[in-house]
Amino acid sequence: MAREQAQALKQAAPVRTFLARALGVRNDERAWRIGADGEEKVAAQLEKVLRKDPRWRDLHVVRVGERGSDIDHVVIGPGGVFTINAKHHPGAKIWVAGDTFMVNGQWQPYIRNSRHGAKRAARLLSASCGFSVEVAGVVVLVRAADVAVKDAPDDVFVVPGAEVAGWLRKRPGVLNAEAIEAIFATARRSTTWQP
């Protein structure tokens, strides 16, 4: 979805987009393009998990509700169910303490948004599966220069992008093969995500 949005903005104003890129101006097209790059880098890391352990399943760009919101990645495997939000901040300094998430000194709502997305996914998956599905939110940081997690949030994980594959594979087992397949089959249906 991010790549589509960047392309639409570029097509709507190709000269302005070219000039913005040439001059290093930050605009909406750039934000969407960089976001799409981050999502694709995280998807590549998730593919590593699937190659090493075929019990894991993933979905990319899961559209939720009717207002155009989405979840970058939903990952289901022995270690649980995770909603992953890719955040691409090349060269940035990231500082996290509890619910405070700073990018180059600017507060970002990533913890709040990730928590909300995970709770919403848990509610929708549980309703569609017919059994309780716990979902954890994960903020995956792509190409940040420095990541300092002073105090980890209670219910959202913050993981550097290059480490996400190993981090997922090391999660303690909480789901058996039957549960993984049942949740994945439900998560693949678009009707699951439309309340």
Image: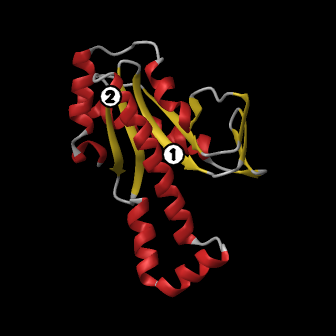
Residue 35 location (% of width, % of height): 51, 56
Question: Which quadrant holds the N terminus?
Answer: bottom left
Distance from the alpha carbon under mark 2 to that under mark 1: 20 Å
Q: Mark 1: few, some, or many residues within 10 Å (few <14, many ≥20)?
A: many
State left or right for residue 90 relative to residue 106.
Answer: left
The residue type indicated by label 2 comes to Arg
| Residue ID for mark 2 | 51
* Vertical relation: 78 (above or below) 96: above
Farthest residue, direction right: 105
State left or right for residue 151 relative to residue 44.
Answer: right
* Vertical relation: 16 (above or below) 72: below
Instruction: Look at 65% across and 45% down and name the residue there.
Output: 144
Residue 184 location (% of width, % of height): 26, 31
Q: Nearer the viewer, mark 2 or mark 1?
A: 2
Task: Tell me how the rendering is colored.
Answer: secondary structure
* In front of the other: 171 or 128: 171
| Residue ID for mark 1 | 86
Q: Secondary structure at mark 2?
A: helix
The residue type indicated by label 1 comes to Ala
